[in-house]
Image (cartoon, helix red, strand yellow):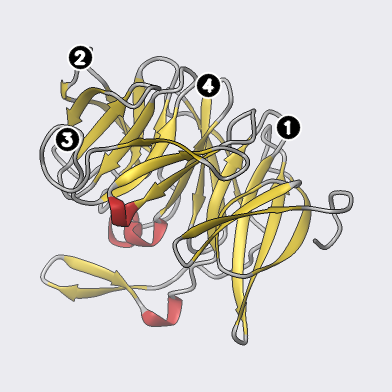
Amino acid sequence: MQPDKSIFVLDAGDHKVKWFSGEGTLIKSYGNGKGRGPGEFLKPVNFMVDSLGSVWVADTSDRKLVRFHADGTLAESYFFEDDPRAIAMTSRGRLASLSFPDSALFKLYDLPEGGGEVSEIKKFGVLVEDQFFSSIALAGTLGVSPDEDYFVYVGLYGGRMASFSLDGNLRFYVETIDGAPFPPVVKAEKDAYKISRRGKKVSQVLATITREDIYIVRTRWSGPDLEAFLDVYDPADGRYRYSIRYELPCKPLLLTDALFFASCDGYVQKWRRIGPPGEEA
């Protein structure tokens, strides 16, 4: 979400990132549809908006990262040897990306001016034992600090959160209040691994960082209804602060302690919180 309350949304089905005003009006689209051509995507999985308004989109199937200018025009494309997944852009023109299967969770890249093949600087982020074997269970989301001087990783499984500096140094690593056990990983075939069905509890689904707070969206099913909890943490050390419970009608896209956005049947709904932080919404 932008300071003016507008929001960017990845429309994977339309192979575009879309920018909406706070009132829900479409302002601009980023992307040229499905394909392998300039500005096109096969499987866009993640995006971010940097401090200059540029939109960066990661495509795992085509192994590329595409940057668009704020006005929607194509800037350049970067190409990877492996699949870019969740991404975090830094103020130094470097990119951190989730990497698995691998012995380290992240890879740090230098992005050449004007696009082209990227070069790996280092690997970092060893959070569990036998990480190469279990790294698929460390899938998660990344969020960048407002000053782009550190990023935060939030695991989809197992209630874990970690923060790293631009150089890959660990700032903190904590277990969140989600309380879900780390899921077991089993061998599927040859050298492929998968998460056991007994452990397929995706709970922490989003992370948003401000200068004052880290917001983590945590979900769970209660009968036919999807419940969402907004857990708030201190960005300095990962210390838990408070939670807000929401009764969401559909999939959450972004939450803060005052607003949340949800994807419902192809539409984005905007909800506003009534009442002070720390109370049920």
- Residue drawn at (49%, 59%) of the image: 267
Q: Give yes or no for contact between labels 4 and 3 (Cβ–Cβ under 8 Å).
A: no
Q: Are marks 3 and 1 in contact (CB under 8 Å)?
A: no
Corner quadrant of residue 163 = top right
Three-letter code, disc 2: Gly
Whether residue 105 is visible to the viewer of this picture, yes or no, is: no
Position in image of residue 281 (x %, y %): 80, 61
Observer-side mark, 1 or 2, equals: 2
Amino acid type, residue under disc 1 in the picture: Glu
Crowdedness of circle 3 by 10 Å Cα count: few (<14), some, many (20+)?
some
* Residue 93 rendering spot, x and y as whole percentages: 36, 17
Query: Which element type, helix, strand or loop, lies under badge 4?
Result: loop
Residue position for label 2: 114
Q: Is residue 194 visible?
A: yes
The mark nearer the N terminus, 4 or 3, is 3
**Residue receiving disc 1:** 212
Residue at 73 percent across and 32 percent down: it is 212
Whole-angstrom CA distance, mark 4 to mark 3, is 23 Å
Label located before the other in sequence (4 or 2):
2
Report which residue position mark 4 lands on. Answer: 149
Question: Which element type, helix, strand or loop, lies under badge 3?
Answer: loop
| CA distance for labels 1 and 2 | 35 Å
Label 3: which residue?
Answer: 80
Going from N to C along the chain, the mark reached first, 2 or 3, is: 3
